[in-house]
């Protein structure tokens, strides 16, 4: 009997992801910055980046085999944008706002609402999560299409496989998995998510401990990426958790989560970094890429990402939690 090979995470060599040192910086002669790590000095030209990419995120125009994808992208922990990966999905032609309104109609779904577009982000000294509002999907579309106005920024972005849990009517327009990715990782996706929102909805800089596949159905997503080797230059601080709550007058207030543990999060905005407060970030050099409709971004685990999108962008998002791991989370 022929057995299927499994190209799992346990075969990876990701030592460069585990760079644990204190990123204190100082000036060398001539003004060049170096970073002090314990008793060692890391020069401005940080060699870990060269294990990731050169100048930009590469494009693949053809579907890879599971073995080739594992060898060339998963094991070296490198992102890529894949074209022609899901041209056969009916969603590419069917998923307009008009179609979604007709199919999902007034079904009540979960929508993240914030005053400024930033959900799960640092604000006023807290790690603030969005208000999770239950509302008819048709009312949400009225806001996205600007047929009505409502205070705040609205985004369907719930995790935990909301495509199958909240939007089962749409499942037949896509695939439940990316077959070659499932074979490369030796497991099916742990969640498949449906995201749709306003252009003001922004994902703050963070990293995930799982493998991501972003499939853009309509519109564009704009990514700012940092490899794991930039970790020493990216600040983390602990913040008390809180949640946005909208008052009767339409204003937002920040409500503390009582008796909850502090959350480690990145306070820095990579689009406008405060280099006086976080000078080490000057040593980090992000990659930027735009994922357009019909394209798929493979974002490996532990890569930092900040995400913006065009108005009304529709995307499907697959995530695979590791079955086994041999690298250290930092």
Image: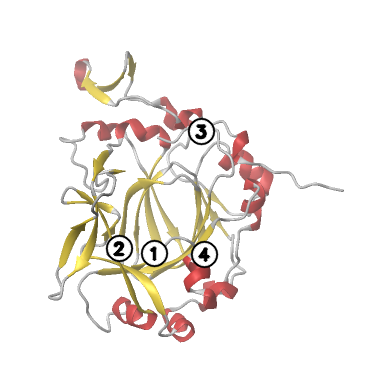
Q: Nearer the viewer, mark 3 or mark 2?
A: 3
Furthest residue toward top? 39
Where does label 1 land, which residue? Answer: 157
Q: Percent position (x, y) of residue 263?
A: 29, 45
Q: Are marks 2 and 1 in contact (CB under 8 Å)?
A: yes
Where does label 2 land, which residue? Answer: 201
Q: Are marks 3 and 1 in contact (CB under 8 Å)?
A: no
Q: Are marks 1 and 4 in contact (CB under 8 Å)?
A: no
Note whether 106 is above or below 279 in the view shown. below
Colour style of the rendered protein structure: secondary structure
Marks 1 and 4 sit apart, C-alpha to C-alpha, by 20 Å
Q: Percent position (x, y) of residue 235?
A: 27, 37
Left or right of 38? Residue 182 is right
Q: Nearer the viewer, residue 206 or 28?
A: 206
Marks 2 and 1 sit apart, C-alpha to C-alpha, by 10 Å
Marks 4 and 3, the one that precedes in the sequence: 4
Determine crowd level at label 3: few under 14, some 14-19, many 20+ residues with C-alpha closer than 10 A. Answer: some
Q: Nearer the viewer, mark 1 or mark 4?
A: 1
Q: Which mark is residue 294?
A: 4
């Amino acid at each position: 009997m022929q057995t299927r090979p499994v190209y799992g995470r346990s075969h990876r060599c990701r030592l460069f992801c585990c760079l644990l040192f204190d990123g204190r910086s100082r000036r060398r002669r001539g003004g060049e910055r170096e970073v002090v790590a314990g008793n060692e000095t890391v020069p401005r030209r940080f060699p870990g980046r060269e294990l990731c990419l050169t100048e930009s995120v590469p494009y693949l125009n053809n579907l890879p085999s599971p073995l080739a994808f594992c060898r060339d992208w998963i094991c070296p922990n490198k992102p890529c944008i894949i074209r022609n990966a899901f041209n056969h999905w009916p969603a590419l032609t069917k998923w307009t706002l008009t179609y979604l309104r007709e199919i999902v109609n007034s079904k009540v779904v979960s929508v993240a609402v914030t005053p400024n577009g930033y959900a799960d982000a640092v604000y006023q000294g807290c790690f603030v999560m969005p208000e999770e509002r239950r509302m008819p999907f048709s009312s949400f579309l009225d806001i996205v299409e600007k047929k009505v106005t409502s205070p705040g920024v609205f985004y369907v972005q719930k995790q935990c496989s909301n495509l199958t849990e909240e939007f089962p009517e749409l499942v037949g327009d896509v695939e439940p998995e990316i077959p070659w990715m499932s074979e490369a990782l030796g497991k099916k996706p742990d969640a498949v998510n449906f995201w749709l929102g306003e252009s003001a909805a922004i994902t703050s800089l963070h990293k995930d401990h799982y493998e991501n596949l972003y499939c853009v159905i309509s519109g564009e997503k704009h990514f700012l990426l940092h490899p794991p080797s930039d970790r020493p230059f990216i600040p983390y601080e602990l913040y008390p958790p809180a949640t946005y709550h909208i008052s009767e007058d339409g204003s937002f207030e920040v409500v503390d989560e009582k008796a909850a543990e502090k959350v480690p999060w990145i306070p820095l905005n990579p689009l406008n970094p405060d280099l006086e407060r976080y000078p080490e970030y000057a040593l980090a050099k992000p990659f930027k890429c735009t994922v357009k409709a019909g394209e798929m971004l493979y974002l490996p685990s532990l890569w930092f990402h900040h995400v913006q999108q065009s108005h009304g962008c529709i995307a499907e998002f697959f995530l695979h939690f590791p079955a086994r791991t041999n690298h250290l989370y930092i």
